[in-house]
């Protein structure tokens, strides 16, 4: 038991240093983001490549000091000039750090409450991260519309289709989220006599990430994350265990059927997880 206690203490200490390093780096790099932001809004409002480059530096500085990162399949990443819908399994708080090191200008979706956090939340705003109130149907529809608009204007978007971090490390269901949301939104717009909006939302496909890809004609890029959940399991964000992380970027999947895109992307990620000894629900 003393050995286990020593490991826990070491993980806690490592976690403290992790947050100290990322906080100090964030302060200096946030200042750089603020300085370049006016030029970003003038010349690169949608992709925000300069801001994402700064975020890559921040994530790389933090990650490189605490765990080994291996990336496979970089050749499958489209260039920043080609929009795409990225999807991945979600295991840990570390997933965002890990994905930012790839240097691609994709827009994450985040709870609105996170934007209130000093420095980190403000940096997310400058990056163009998309806010979402999870239990608000209108917010969810606005989020979808904004994703479609961003992709049409050349930016990429990133989804975790499981909707939340896996509690047991196994791949969850890629959720069908929007049926009830669509119903209530259609009722709202009908009552408000905004019938054009009713038709727009009624015709929205049911699967969020994959409906965006199907509607805009851009490819889906599945990504499998391995190891982040072991380093920092959900509910244990104050600890950082030792270990390594592997990112596998799969070949793009194209098509105009959201249901098939969803099935194909989940199968690719599930097969990879099973191959590496992880479970699937």
Image: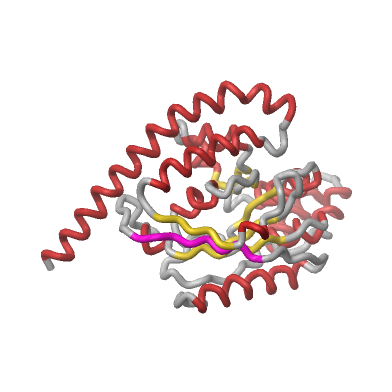
Q: In this view, does 66 lie to the left or right of 97?
A: left
- On the image, the x and y values in percent for residue 145 come to 75, 48
In the image, the segment drawn in magenta is 243-250
- On the image, the x and y values in percent for residue 253 come to 73, 66
**Residue 207's image quarter?**
bottom right
Residue at 36% in and 46% down = 65
Residue at 65% in and 44% down = 105
Q: Is residue 123 magenta?
A: no
- On the image, the x and y values in percent for residue 270 come to 57, 74
**Residue 36's image quarter?**
top right
Give the prevailing secondary structure in the magenta stretch. Answer: strand
Locate the N terminus and report the quarter of the image it occupies.
bottom left
- On the image, the x and y values in percent for residue 18 come to 34, 44
Residue at 50% in and 29% down = 30
Q: In this view, does 84 lie to the left or right of 235?
A: right
- Which of 162/21 is in front? 21
Q: Residue furthest left?
A: 2
Residue at 71% in and 48% down = 79
* Residue 245 vertical placement versus 61 (above, below): below
- Which of 229/104 is in front? 104
* Residue 158 vertical placement versus 267 (above, below): above
């Amino acid at each position: 038991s003393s050995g286990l206690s020593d490991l826990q203490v070491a993980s806690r200490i490592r976690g403290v240093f992790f947050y100290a390093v990322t906080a100090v780096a964030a302060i200096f790099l946030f200042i750089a983001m603020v300085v370049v932001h006016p030029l970003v809004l003038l010349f690169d409002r949608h992709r925000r490549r300069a801001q994402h480059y700064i975020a890559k530096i921040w994530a790389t500085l933090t990650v490189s000091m605490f765990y080994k990162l291996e990336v496979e399949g970089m050749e499958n990443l489209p260039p920043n000039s080609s929009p795409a819908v990225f999807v991945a399994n979600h295991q840990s708080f570390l997933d965002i750090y890990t994905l930012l090191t790839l240097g691609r200008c994709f827009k994450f979706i985040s709870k609105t409450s996170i934007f209130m956090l000093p420095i980190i939340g403000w940096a997310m705003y400058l990056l163009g991260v998309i806010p979402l109130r999870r239990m608000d149907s209108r917010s969810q529809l606005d989020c979808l519309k904004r994703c479609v608009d961003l992709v049409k204007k050349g930016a990429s978007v990133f989804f975790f289709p499981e909707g939340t971090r896996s509690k047991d490390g196994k791949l969850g269901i890629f959720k069908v989220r929007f049926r009830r949301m669509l119903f209530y939104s259609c009722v709202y717009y009908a009552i408000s006599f905004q019938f054009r909006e009713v038709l727009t939302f009624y015709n929205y496909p049911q699967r969020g990430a994959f409906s965006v890809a199907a509607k805009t004609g851009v490819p889906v890029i599945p990504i499998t994350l391995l190891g982040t959940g072991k380093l920092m399991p959900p509910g244990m964000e104050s600890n950082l265990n030792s270990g390594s992380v592997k990112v596998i970027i799969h070949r793009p999947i194209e098509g105009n059927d959201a249901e098939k895109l969803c099935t194909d992307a989940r199968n690719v990620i599930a097969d990879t997880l099973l191959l590496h000894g992880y479970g699937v629900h």
